Image (cartoon, grey):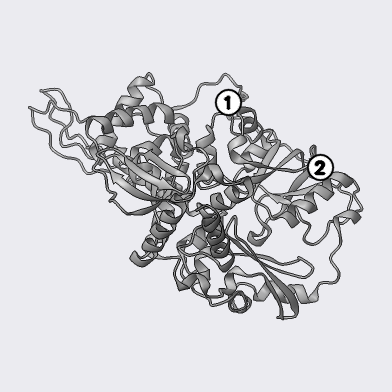
Amino acid sequence: MTNAAKITDPWHHSQSWSAHGHQWQFTYNSFNATYTIENSDRSIILSVPIRETDHYPSPQAWLDHWAKTKGKHQLKQGTKQSKQPSLLDFNPQSSNSIPPKNPKGISFGQTLEQLYQGKTCTRRVWSDRTAKTFIRYYEQGIKVPAYNKGLQYGGEIIGWLTLTEKPVQQPLVEMTQADLKAEGFPNYTFEQFINEFFEGKNQPVWVICFQFTPNQPQESSVTVEVVESNDNQALTETDELTDEEERDLLHLERKVERAFYEAGKALCEIRDRQLYRTRHQTFETYVKERFSMKQSRSYQLMDAAIVVDNLLPKVPPMVEVSANDSQKVPPMVEANDNLNKVPQSVEVSDDSNKVPPMVEVLPTSERQVRPLTKLEPDQQREAWAKAVEQAGGKVPSGRIVKSIVDKIRERKPVPNPWHKGDVAMIMVKDNPDLRGKGGCWCVITEVHDFSCTVRLWDGNYQVKPENLKELPYSNEQQEEVRKLCDRLSKITLDEVEKPMKDFLRGLGKIDRPWLTDFEEKVLRMLEESNI
């Protein structure tokens, strides 16, 4: 590339230094593009977000800022702590045994429900050092603490994991349907799984198989007082619900069904009003640290809330009454935020004989709504109505909704937003031809009505517009990526040995528009030998 590749970047070289009462080690993993800072006894392990490497000139500068802000309390606690106890000294089966202060465990913030329902396997992007620790736990029969969320987010131990197999590293592409079941997602496809948990990136991960034993709640005595009703007749399971109870049940069921909707509405308001600003610099940091939620997941919920708002019944202009009925009839109110308001009555003329279409069945999960986000508001209502009809009047699955959406989009295609020469990132989604290419950068070489031809590190592919994601690069940075793409396309892969091919595959997934000194040197050597 240009001279930018020759500049020594402190963010891409491992280093160590002393500061704030600790010895620190910075590690950069070029394959996964991860930046980690940890102290010598590993009681503090910090993951630096990629975007923040542009705001701080070095890892030391980032750590100094962290120590003055978020890390002030953690550093103060660390200076008071004595030697950290080891998991080797802890027996979870002993009631007299005290667990270590910060034992190395596994958090299940995103899959807590699946863990309690029988999840027996998890996949993690770990460093080799972390993986060796868990391999040692397996070999020595040490039980691993399970956390309800990460320690940095205030996680607590909810149970213990017995490792049933030695942790091994495998590419995500080798996952089978049995693996998805063990992960707790038997109804997911491979693409759905990596899109939700690995941002569409097909990469090597560590596979950890285990048996989960939840913490047993402490025994407590419960006093039950039996109160007779006024008519001295005890309630039984066969008692009919009163009209008021029926209304309460319907109201509570609506709350359960709309949980994802309420979450999306709340996140929209927090983002739009920037209510996170006193504690977090960005909305992405806020949702990650407050809810252990990825930015992509938060936007899925917010997009879903917008769709549901569009599906909710609106105020109808007319209601149906009998011709000789002269009473005042209240109109429907918006189901969005006026459910508890008393509607004003309106006069209804004798010729009122029209009824607006009402949405009786609403989505119960974000996944049912996700395909609708690709449509215009009118098309969303049309697609949902057809999906409900196809499901026999019940809540349709995401698969049914997607099939309806695909038919509507074929009938009225959305204009292709991409242009020749654009640089984008591959999103696998439901395209099996792109398996293994998730997270790769690409250059668009041809633009068609409903697809694009793109060039990756290993050749050309045909993709749909929705399989591409915009990268936040300037025009100059995009030009550097195009130059790299041209260089890689001139290399004959059939003549390249496997280690070098793995190196090229890694270049095809870098999330920066430049090469490090080492990468530039190896690529140049490979180009010279391939002539």
- Residue 134, percent from left and from top: 78, 49
Q: Residue at label 2?
A: 219
Depth check, mark 2 against mark 1: the one in front is 2
Question: Where residue 231 is drawn, which disc sits there?
Answer: 1
Which quadrant would residue 399 be assigned to in this image? Answer: top left
- Residue 245, percent from left and from top: 47, 31
**How far apart, in angstroms, are the residues tagged by discs 2 and 1?**
36 Å
- Between 510 and 326, the one lying in front of the other is 510
Which quadrant would residue 175 be assigned to in this image? Answer: top right
- Residue 265, percent from left and from top: 40, 50
Question: Where residue 424 is drawn, which disc sits there?
Answer: none
- Between 240 and 21, the one lying in front of the other is 21
Instruction: Tell me which residue sits at (23%, 43%) in the image.
Output: 415
Crowd band around label 2 with a 10 angstrom C-alpha radius: few (<14), some (14–19), many (20+): few
- Residue 278 visible from this viewpoint: no
Instruction: Tell me which residue sits at (83%, 59%) in the image.
Output: 100
- Residue 365, percent from left and from top: 46, 37
Depicted 450 relative to depicted 351: above or below: below
Left or right: 290, with 17 as reference point? left
Which mark sits nearer the N-terminus, 2 or 1?
2
Tell me the amino acid under the disc marked 2.
Glu
Instruction: Tell me which residue sits at (41%, 55%) in the image.
Output: 486
Left or right: 183, with 424 as reference point? right
Tell me the amino acid under the disc marked 1.
Asp
- Between 172 and 282, the one lying in front of the other is 172
